[in-house]
Image: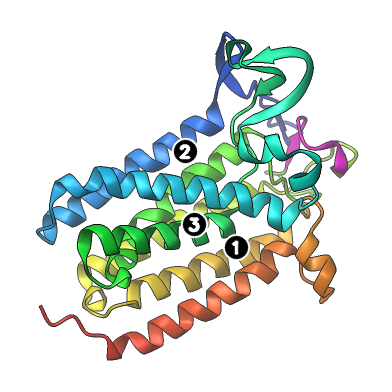
Amino acid sequence: MINLLSFIDWNPQPYLFELGGFKVHIYSLCWIVAFVVGWYLMSNIFKKENQKKELLDPLFLYTFIGAIAGARLGEYLFYDPSAFIERPIEVFLPVQSAQGKSAFFGLLQNYEFVGFSGLASHGAALGVIITSYLFSRKYLHRNVLWLLDRMAVVVPFGGAAVRIGNFYNSEIVGKPSDLPWAVKFYEQSLGYGEIVPRHPAQIYEAIGYVILGIIMLYAYNKTDKRKQLGALFGLFLFLLFLIRFIVEFYKENQGEEAVAQALNIGLNNGQILSIPFMLIGLYLYISSKNRIITN
């Protein structure tokens, strides 16, 4: 699988096993790891702040729906908008056209289960913000920024797990590179052309998210920022999408790059979509001193 003598050859089987047309993918397992780690960290936060542990289950249901739905819709809205007309089934279900096959034990003919491999982090962010607002309104009855501040401590580690899944799947590959740790992704999209050593941009991003997670844990546990509504969430938004903005310089462009093509300002989709999040994060962090929690 790996040959360290001449760059890194990467061509793994993307799933563990198959049963009745259903494949258990490594990428899907990385999402599970992300939510398990998130549940553990959030349970500690809830315990520290005397919140009901029973709220964790509905919270993660809301978060799961927001993250998956937002990421899936964002992937096609930002990178492949024509799919809404040409392949609507593939947009809303984790399947791909496979002529002559049947999936889901015959319930969907000519489609193969492939998991949700197309997921956009910007869409996931919007989805989680929306479902966090709905959860706060129904269960917590307090400002949504309180919840988002605490979720900001948890999310970076999950993001790192998902990027590792992208690496395993040979997705979101980097630009060509001659660095000794460059990787030959043999299962990369044919749209990238010749198989050449490339930056492991997914790993760069995963490392950045782990560092961000450590910063957020420190800010939550060792400073008073958790008492300022929006401070932790603002810091998280700014740093997360700053990491994304920087790593994009080492990535190949994704899909149709619909937003970048429309604006034509020399940046790609990921960078353009990151800028509003960074600005919002900066605003929330600076203005948080006016939103002090008094009890």
Query: Residue 31 has which mark?
Result: 2
Picture quarter with the N terminus: top right
Asked whether residue 98 is drawn in magenta, I would say no
Q: Residue at x 61, y 34 (%)?
A: 93
Colour mapping used in the image: rainbow
Q: Residue at x 54, y 28 (%)?
A: 26
Which-is-in-front pick, marks 3 and 2?
A: 3
Residue, disc 3: 127
Q: Is residue 58 above or below residue 128?
A: above
Q: Nearer the viewer, residue 186 or 237?
A: 237
Q: Is residue 177 left or right of residue 59?
A: right
Residue 38 visible to the viewer: no
Q: Is residue 25 above or below residue 20?
A: below
Q: Nearer the viewer, residue 232 or 62?
A: 62
Q: Secondary structure at mark 1?
A: helix
Quadrant hosting residue 141? bottom left
Which of the two labelled residues, at mark 3 and mark 2, occupies the earlier sequence position? 2
Q: Nearer the viewer, residue 129 or 185?
A: 129
**Separation of disc 1 and disc 3 at Cα?**
18 Å
Q: Amino acid at mark 1?
A: Arg
Q: Secondary structure at mark 3?
A: helix
Q: Amino acid at mark 2?
A: Trp
Which-is-in-front pick, marks 1 and 3?
A: 3
Residue, disc 1: 244
Q: Rate crowding at label 1 as few (under 14), some (14 to 19) or many (20 or more) other CA atoms within 10 Å.
A: many
